[in-house]
Amino acid sequence: MFAAGRTVSRQTISFLPLGADIALDGICNLPNDQEVEARVAEPESTLVAATRKFHWKPARAWFRSLELGAYETARVKLEAPALDLGCGDGSVASTLMSRGILECSSVWGIDYDASVLTSAQSESVYSGLARGDVRQLPFRDAAFQSIVTNGVLGGVADAEKGCREVARVLRPGGMFAATVPTDRFIDTLLWPRVLAHVSRRAAHRYVERFNRRLDHLTDYPSSTEWRDRWERNGLIVDRIEGFLSGRAGGIYNVLAMHLFRFFGLLRGAPRTLQMAIAFGLRMALHRAYLREISSASRPGYVLIVGHRKASDALHPEEGGAE
């Protein structure tokens, strides 16, 4: 994630080249329209993918399944060369690649946290990695055909600069996809609602701690305000897909309790045990997942998909980084 309020100058950027383009499970080309429609028609498959990838962290598995469902409902196809903005350990990108949402050749990752970049190297999904700030990207203008960022801008002070930088490094006609929290996010959580009946101060303190844990700022723009931020910076928003309703947010909030942290001990368990855990988690969440994707009212998160005008003055160039 990108730390709020901190900046990294272009001079301190550290590039970690990983060599040639990579492949993941034999999937490098984006699916055709028929394949996309087939996946949308089988929404349970997104829950299967998320629980297999994140079985060791139930709250993350639940959230990522809903996020992945939004990507597939919106029929997102992110072409190379692509930038994963706030790439973390690369696990989300690898999941998007495995679902055919993100083309897996020539994908760059960038994050502020050097420790997660080390983990991203072991994930082996990127053509190159860089340490940097979303508000001052170390790439030339119009370097990427696609840009994806998941949950990052909600934790960045002056996210407007981040939107501006995305517009700068995106090629004319290129696509961006961003998941961001909205002003309804806190309302979706269970424990603040419960605590508010006892003490508003206790509820407020819980929200502050939860925001710090997620690297979220306390300022949550509405989906309309997010749209305006992108469009003020020269990008066109094509679609906004909501996810994480109040019901889903309550499940997420419960699964994020310290009680469930013991699952993390099972991350290095034998493969057979991992698959059994993923199956059990999937069965526990299955009914709630199907109910959520059929109607996500008043969502706490949105997926924003858009593009840069093809007639923009900047001309696209080949390659990724400077």
Image (tube, rainbow, N blue to C red):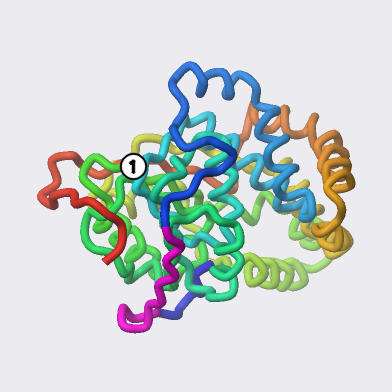
Say what amino acid the circle numbered 1 marks: Met
Residue positioned most to the front: 20
Q: Which residue is rendered at x = 51% and y = 44% of the image?
A: 23
Position of 124 compared to 133: left or right? right
Q: Position of residue 155 (x, y in %)?
A: 51, 66
Locate residue 145: give its quadrant: top left
Which of the two residues, 188 or 289, is positioned nearer the viewer here? 289
Locate residue 236: give its quadrant: top left
Q: Which residue is rendered at x = 13% and y = 40% of the image?
A: 311
Position of 12 relative to 250 (above/below): below
Q: Position of residue 128 (x, y in %)?
A: 42, 61
- Is residue 201 in view from this perspective? yes
Position of 199 compared to 165: left or right? right
Label 1 sits on a secondary structure element that is strand
Q: Which residue is rendered at x = 72% and y = 47% of the image?
A: 61
Which of the two residues, 122 or 186, is positioned nearer the viewer here? 122
> Is residue 16 on the magenta stretch?
yes
User: How many residues crowd mark 1 within 10 Å: few (<14), some (14–19), many (20+)?
Assistant: many
Position of 219 relative to 55 (above/below): below
Q: Position of residue 140 (x, y in %)?
A: 23, 63
Q: Which residue is rendered at x = 40% and y = 72% of the image?
A: 15
Name the image quarter holding the C terminus.
bottom left
User: What span is in magenta?
Assistant: 8-19
Instruction: Identify the residue under disc 1.
Output: 175
Residue positioned most to the left: 313
